[in-house]
Image (tube, rainbow, N blue to C red):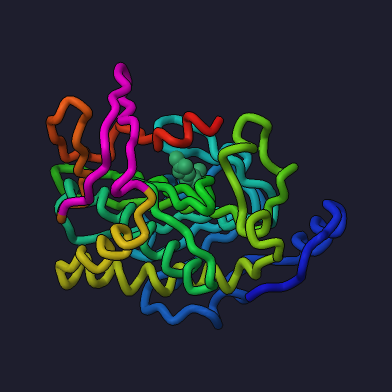
Amino acid sequence: MKKVINPLSKELLNDLTCNDYLTLEELKPLLNTKFIGNSIYYFDTIDSTNTYAKSIGTKSNNGALVISEEQTVGRGRLGRSFMSPKHKGIWMSIILKPNINPKDAAKLTQVAAASVASAINELGIDTKVKWPNDILLNDKKLCGILTELSVSASNINYVIVGIGLNVNLAKDDFNEDIKDNATSLMIESGELWDRKRLLASILNHFEALYIKFTENNDFKASLDICIENSALIGQEILVINRDSIVKATALGIDEEGKLIVQYDNGTYEHLISGEVSIRKRDCLTKK
Ligand code: BTN
């Protein structure tokens, strides 16, 4: 899956990455899936694959994919923006129609996190899952997941699982404000990576874990991967809500996918992902 050894100039890097496409023709032979990727909506550029996926969510098939070579208004959790430069990463949304209780839809974020971590760890790169929706490499953000839900009369119309993975971005591709906290596979490994093989591997893992969860009631398979590779368990953290920042220690993840924390005052809580954001305390002192 590796392509070239660094060092590469930015110009050479752009030349190499701009001929790398994530089209249906490139991806189909690499997919071992039954339904994920049966329909692919492919764009050279788009505002946000999640926004487009929502616009076609009702009429789309289960497992349809929206993939773009770049996003101009990529979105993250809690109203944040997400950088998505052309041909440098995997920017995609999976449209899903699971037959599950809407209150369990957030678990799909962990199914996706487990799939991404498994696919990358198979390359010999040791990523960590930062509950609820990030994948870290060497303590920096490599991937973010944005899960959005449409419900009517307490039934799920569709769920969109958006995945943004920084594959071949150079340091200069990141804005100043995130440069120190974000990274790419290329920056950390010094090598260019084949996006289509990586994308196919993520989707192959995703479908297997998704079927376990939605058809066999086995969420544990995904959870075990998130726990085994957790960036937070055993760490001192800050739990950041809209109007408070509280010191705690992350103890584990329960069977519902909630983060178990013990606050410094001794009390315990099982956190749902909703509006909360987590920071490792040692990251604050490092900056
Ligand atoms: C986060 O970091 O808070 C989540 C980032 C999710 C980014 C992906 S990229 C593909 C999809 N389209 C979007 O606009 N966002 C998600």
Residue 49 percent location from the top left of the image: 51, 49
The kind of secondary structure the magenta stretch mainly shows is: strand
Residue 52 can be seen, yes or no: no
Query: Disc count in the image?
Result: 0
Spot occupied by residue 101 in the image (x, y as percentages of width and height)? 14, 52
237 in magenta: yes
Q: Quadrant of residue 278?
A: top left
**Residue drawn at (67%, 47%), measured in percent from left and top?**
85
Image point 57% across, 57% down: which residue?
90
Q: Is residue 269 left or right of residue 279?
A: left
Front residue of this view, candidates 154 and 260: 260
Above or below, 212 against 98 in this view is: below
Residue placed at 44% from the left, 62% from the top?
116
Q: In percent of the image, x 33 and y 37: which residue is there?
A: 236
Instruction: Report the quarter where the C terminus lies.
Output: top right
* Residue 219: % across, % down: 20, 63
Q: Is residue 43 magenta?
A: no
Image position of 221 with respect to 156: above or below: below
Residue 194 in view of the camera:
yes
Q: Which residues are magenta?
A: 232-254
Horizontal side, residue 237 vs residue 25: left or right: left
Residue 89 position, x and y percent, is: 62, 55
Where, quadrant-wise, is the N terminus in this rendering? bottom right
Instruction: Give the quadrant of residue 208.
Output: bottom left
Q: Nearer the viewer, residue 79 or 258?
A: 258
